[in-house]
Amino acid sequence: MIIAANHLSWADPVLLSHFLYNHGRWPVILAKSGLFKVPFLGHAVAALRAIPVERGSSEAARSLRISEERLADGCAILFYPEGTCTRDPGLWPMTGKTGAARLALESGAPVIPVAHWGAHELLPYGAKKPRLFPPARRSA
């Protein structure tokens, strides 16, 4: 299956992957190729079978070929169609890319749209460390 999810926080892939794993599917994330070059993180991402995406190059299509192979192995492919965390101040989605749709058409795998909320409270985009105690909500 192909999971197409919104992306609000750097914690999103971890939390959604944990959910998929707990429900019997090995999650495979498509990740920016630059993440594979970050010390420790790059090794961890590669060990989890993440797929590097060379954005803006002819190599970008290679990630879809690898995704098809992982689908055949029974993995769940996790796409963030925007390609990055949203930059919209209201956390609305930005314009998506076509990779998830292209993979679905090529492979015949079902696409499951997922909208999740709350991880941005734990680890806002751009934050260096998590907020373990998010601000209290005010009642109206």
Image (spheres, helix red, strand yellow):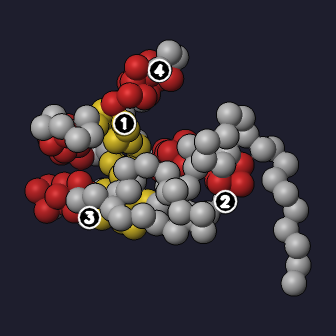
Q: Secondary structure at mark 4?
A: loop
Which residue is depicted at the point 19% across and 44% down?
Answer: 64
Disc 3 marks which amino acid?
Pro
Question: Mark 3 to mark 1: distance in Å?
Answer: 23 Å
111 or 126, which is in the foreground? 126
Residue that badge 2 annotates: 118
Residue that badge 1 annotates: 32
Q: Nearer the viewer, mark 3 or mark 1?
A: 1
Neighbourhood count class around disc 4 (C-alpha, 10 Å): few under 14, some 14–19, many 20 upward: few
Question: Mark 2 to mark 1: distance in Å?
Answer: 23 Å
Residue that badge 4 annotates: 38
Label located before the other in sequence (2 or 4): 4
Label located before the other in sequence (3 or 2): 3
Residue that badge 3 annotates: 110
Which residue is depicted at the point 37% across and 50% down?
Answer: 83
Q: Position of residue 103 (x, y in %)?
A: 19, 55
Q: Secondary structure at mark 1?
A: strand
Q: Position of residue 32 (x, y in %)?
A: 36, 36
Q: Secondary structure at mark 3?
A: loop
* Cβ–Cβ under 8 Å for marks 3 and 1: no
Which residue is depicted at the point 36% across and 64% down?
Answer: 95
Disc 1 marks which amino acid?
Lys
Q: Position of residue 123 (x, y in %)?
A: 67, 45
Q: From what the image shows, is residue 134 above or below residue 113?
A: above
Is residue 120 visible from the viewing direction of this image? yes
Neighbourhood count class around disc 3 (C-alpha, 10 Å): few under 14, some 14–19, many 20 upward: few
Neighbourhood count class around disc 1 (C-alpha, 10 Å): few under 14, some 14–19, many 20 upward: some
Q: Within the image, what quadrant is residue 130 found in?
A: top right
Q: Within the image, what quadrant is residue 81 found in?
A: bottom left
